Amino acid sequence: MAAAQTRVSAFIDAFNRMDIDGACDMLAENVVYHNIPMEPMHGREAARVFLKGMPNLTGLEWEVFNTAENGDTVLNEREDRFFMEGGGKMAVRVMGVFKVENDEIVEWRDYFDLAELAAQQGG
């Protein structure tokens, strides 16, 4: 496994352990994090605030089905599952794109269907 893919795998593993701070520490200070189709976030701390702000979250499970790497860029096809207090859960299919420089994630884009997620939230 090459360096960029190793970093992205460690990043996802941190999420699966609910170690949001540990995952965010792998982001570059000036990272661009973009959940497409929403507006992009700029900076590690903005990403941290967003990720730690998920209400009632008790667990995460990001299952990666396929990964491709080209130099400093890693693509992964995955399903992100979110578990909430009271037994609620949501899942969304995601295509993730990560760019890694100097062992830090400098760009992170997740492409997903917002309607798929909204339907599970009752909206």
Image (cartoon, rainbow, N blue to C red):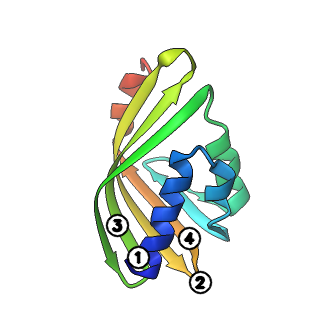
Q: Is residue 80 above or below residue 97?
A: above
Q: Which residue is mark 1?
A: 73
- Residue 7: where, in percent of width, then height? 51, 71
| Kind of residue at badge 2 | Asn
Marks 4 and 3, how far apart in space?
Answer: 13 Å
Residue drawn at point x = 59 percent, y = 83 percent = 102
**Tag 1 near tag 3, CB within 8 Å:** yes
> Which of pointers 1 and 4 lies earlier in the amino acid sequence?
1
Residue drawn at point x = 62 percent, y = 25 percent = 56
Q: Which residue is mark 3?
A: 75
Residue drawn at point x = 34 percent, y = 66 percent = 75
Judged left or right of residue 120, residue 77 is left
Q: Is residue 59 above or below residue 30?
A: above
User: SS for tag 2?
Assistant: loop
Q: Which residue is mark 4?
A: 105
- Residue 61: where, in percent of width, then height? 44, 41
| Kind of residue at badge 1 | Thr
Judged left or right of residue 96, residue 100 is right
Identify the image quadrant of residue 51: top right
**Tag 1 near tag 4, CB within 8 Å:** no
Marks 1 and 4, how far apart in space?
Answer: 10 Å
Mark 3 Cα shell of 10 Å, populated few (<14), some (14-19), many (≥20): some
**Tag 4 near tag 3, CB within 8 Å:** no
Q: Which residue is mark 2?
A: 102
Judged left or right of residue 109, residue 28 is right
| Kind of residue at badge 3 | Leu
Pick the quarter of the image with the N terminus: bottom left
Pick the quarter of the image with the C terminus: top left
- Residue 41: where, in percent of width, then height? 61, 56
Q: Please, which residue is most extreme toward the top here?
A: 86
